[in-house]
Amino acid sequence: MPRAFPKKFRRDMVAVARKAAAPVSRIAKDFGISKSYLQRRLKIADVEDGVRRCATQTETTELREAKKHIRLLEQLVEILRRAAAYLSQASLPN
């Protein structure tokens, strides 16, 4: 599992990269990270800062949880529908 960098470290590397004083590959090398990791952190920072319009990580997590809850509710509705159909069949006179 990759190691997690502290928030301050991530903020610092994004700030340096945004200044564009050097190429991204050079900045990544100076921080001891891969170029792709720095590019990914720049995209994430753009979303979180509102520069790029996309769902933030918090919104994505909330959406995933909401979808799980919707699936559960749909299953409950289906169970209740089947139970109602069964009970209505059982109450019919023979």
Image: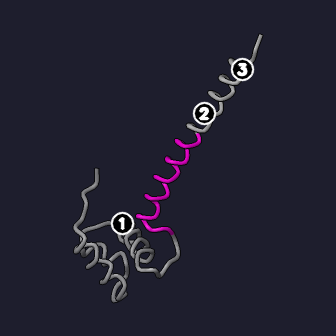
Regarding mark 3 in the picture, which secondary structure is present there? helix
Q: CA distance from mark 3 to mark 2?
A: 14 Å
Mark with earlier residue (3, 2): 2
Q: Confirm or deny contact between disc 3 and disc 1 (CB under 8 A).
A: no
Disc 1 versus disc 2: nearer the observer: 2
Residue occupying image coordinates x 41% and y 68%? 40
Regarding mark 1 in the picture, which secondary structure is present there? helix
Residue occupying image coordinates x 44% and y 68%? 56
Q: Amino acid at mark 2?
A: Leu
Mark with earlier residue (3, 1): 1
Disc 3 versus disc 1: nearer the observer: 3
> Which residue is labeled 3 in the image?
89
Q: Is residue 59 magenta?
A: yes
Disc 3 versus disc 2: nearer the observer: 3
Q: Is residue 67 magenta?
A: yes
The segment highlighted magenta reads: 55-74
* Classed neighbour count for the residue bearing mark 3: other residues with Cα under 10 Å, few (<14), some (14–19), many (≥20): few
> Which residue is labeled 1 in the image?
37
Q: Nearer the viewer, residue 78 or 86?
A: 86
Q: Main secondary structure of the magenta part?
A: helix
Q: Position of residue 48 (x, y in %)?
A: 41, 75
Q: Amino acid at mark 3?
A: Gln
> Which residue is labeled 2 in the image?
80
Query: Residue 35 is drawn in which quadrant?
Result: bottom left
* Classed neighbour count for the residue bearing mark 1: other residues with Cα under 10 Å, few (<14), some (14–19), many (≥20): few
Residue occupying image coordinates x 35% and y 88%? 19
Q: Is residue 42 left or right of residue 77?
A: left
> Which image quadrant: the C terminus?
top right
Q: Is residue 42 left or right of residue 64?
A: left
